[in-house]
Amino acid sequence: MVQDRAVPETPDIVIGNTTLKYTAKNPAIRFLTERWVANLERVIGQLAADPQGGPTRVLEVGCGEGVIADKLHQRFGEVVAVDLPDAGLRAWWRNYPGPGYLHADAHRLPFDDDQFDLVVSVEVLEHLTDPERGLREMARVAKRHVIFSVPREPIFRGCNLITGRYVSNLGNTPGHLNHWSKRSFTKFVGTVANIRGVTTPFPWTTVWGTVRG
């Protein structure tokens, strides 16, 4: 359930999606988002069929509105979903009551080592002030599987420019502090995990790996 105690909101950080991509009126954004989600579900389906056993405890870091957390809950049951304090997100979470929601910072996760069989973090690492620390934290609490997804650059910014979005920022979406190509992001995730699969649903990169140690 959503925690009830009052918490301070998070100043000076872009929280959630700048564009409500899951419910976008723009058919192109909605189409690309649906393809990205379908690809993510295929990747999750692959690891669910892992011969060594599928996940039973799952964490989503940076769960946003709760859409992906809800899909994880439908598949695996026990899901914890975290994001920064924000009243708008808490309102969204009421639409997806299955996961257990908490407020937490990706740089300092309040969990033990190896606590979750699967850690998922999509459209988050590009927002972190210290992505290396965030990546290590997520790998620390993961017992086996990790799945990460980020915008594929410079394609993502190029798409923004073509559609006339964020032109003054050269197409950079507000809150995006870090930028990776497919190759550089795969290498980045490879610092903490053995890469099991890389997919490129336009215009994103999704990487599945198994953590070392």
Image (spheres, rainbow, N blue to C red):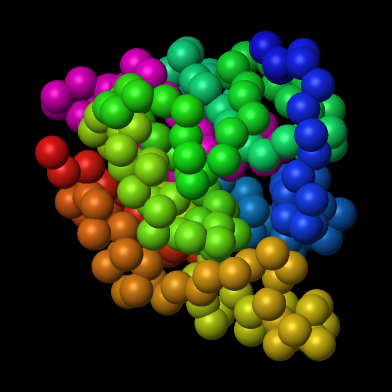
Q: Which residues are magenta?
A: 39-67
**Residue 29 pos. (x, y %):** 73, 61
Does the magenta-highlighted stretch encompass residue 107?
no
Answer yes or no: is residue 68 visible.
no
Residue pictured at 80% horizontal, 78% vertical? 165
In the figure, is residue 104 to the left or right of 208? Answer: right
Q: Where's the N terminus, which quadrant?
A: top right
Does the magenta-highlighted stretch encompass residue 47?
yes
**Residue 89 pos. (x, y %):** 77, 35
In the figure, is residue 16 to the left or right of 137? Answer: right
In the figure, is residue 86 to the left or right of 46? Answer: right
Answer yes or no: is residue 135 visible.
yes
**Residue 142 pos. (x, y %):** 31, 33
Closest to the observer: 173 or 10? Answer: 10
Residue pictured at 86% horizontal, 54% vertical? 25
Count of numbered labels shown in the rendering: 0
**Residue 41 pos. (x, y %):** 46, 39
Residue pictured at 59% horizontal, 18% vertical? 99
Q: Is residue 204 above or below residue 86?
A: below
Closest to the observer: 178 or 171? Answer: 178
Q: Where's the C terminus, which quadrant?
A: top left
In the figure, is residue 205 to the left or right of 124? Answer: left
Residue pictured at 22% horizontal, 42% vertical? 210
Q: Is residue 111 above or below residue 85?
A: above
